[in-house]
Image (spheres, helix red, strand yellow):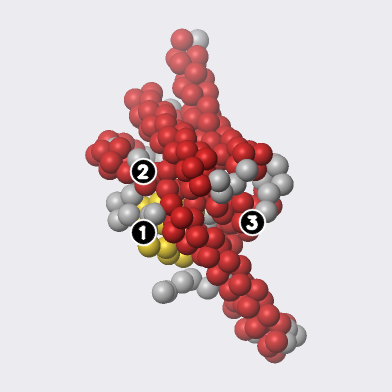
Amino acid sequence: MNERLPSSYHSIQREGTAGVRQSDNKKQWGEKGKVEEKIRFIIRRVLKRTGFGLEIKVDRCGTNMTYDFIHDYVTFDPDRIVQAVSEQKVPVDLDAYVTAITLHELGHAIDRNALLDSVARSIEVFNSKRGIPVQAQYRDPAILQMLIGEEERNLVFEKTAWENAEMLNAMHRFVEPAKFNPIAAQSLGTYEKKLAGLVGKMTELNGSATA
């Protein structure tokens, strides 16, 4: 599998000037590899127990985990996952976090038909805003309303996925609710915040138009 090397790799290779020993290089990559394999093991365990035969791919894209509903597989970014665990408002261990977000992606998989049905509208929104600077989009009522509609749909998909994840979690008893619920709430909060921001911009736009 072709993976992009972290930017730190190149600085480590210049050990002649940086004074980094080769053994330190091996140690760092060994630790990264162990974390990646641990995460992959957790994901596989969840897939096996729930009966989902999805392919697992590594994608260092900055998003902790994603379900590709077009091609029906899941991806994960081990570096981002480790960072996300440390960002949780309610402390949680790696195992519980990875299990919860895997169940969330399976929640999207359960809702795959609805996601596929939304593609045409998403393409329409994309084409409408293509080539228009972001700030200009926020000043156009028609485009801004489309963006709000898109975020509203995204939030519905996210809520549905977490509801499905909660159902799977209850069936298989993976993660105790005291750990699962805060992860779900914090995840949904990012989408709710983005939607609220767009609605706020529309309110400001309407206010300036009537002033």
Residue 162, position in %: x, y? 48, 38
Neighbour tally class for label 2: few under 14, some 14-19, many 20 plus, Cα within 10 Å:
some
Neighbour tally class for label 1: few under 14, some 14-19, many 20 plus, Cα within 10 Å:
few
Locate residue 128: give its quadrant.
top left
Residue receiving disc 2: 110
CA separation in Å, label 2 and label 3: 24 Å
Residue receiving disc 3: 94
Q: Secondary structure at mark 3?
A: helix
Question: Is 2 drawn above or below residue 122 in the view shown?
Answer: below
Q: Secondary structure at mark 2?
A: helix
Question: Is 17 drawn above or below residue 206 in the view shown?
Answer: below
Q: Earlier in the sequence, mark 2 or mark 1?
A: 1
Report the quarter where the N terminus lies: bottom left
Residue 99, position in %: x, y? 55, 52
Q: Nearer the viewer, residue 136 or 86?
A: 86
The residue drawn where x is 46% and y is 16% is: 206
Residue 124 relative to residue 168: left or right: left
Tell me which amino acid carries mark 3: Leu
Q: Earlier in the sequence, mark 2 or mark 3?
A: 3
Q: How many marks?
A: 3
CA separation in Å, label 2 and label 1: 13 Å
Tell me which amino acid carries mark 1: Gly
Residue 58, position in %: x, y? 46, 65
Neighbour tally class for label 3: few under 14, some 14-19, many 20 plus, Cα within 10 Å:
some
Can I make out residue 49 in this image?
yes
The residue drawn where x is 38% and y is 62% is: 55
Tell me which amino acid carries mark 2: Ile
CA separation in Å, label 1 and label 3: 23 Å
The residue drawn where x is 51% and y is 47% is: 172
Residue receiving disc 1: 53
Q: Earlier in the sequence, mark 1 or mark 3?
A: 1
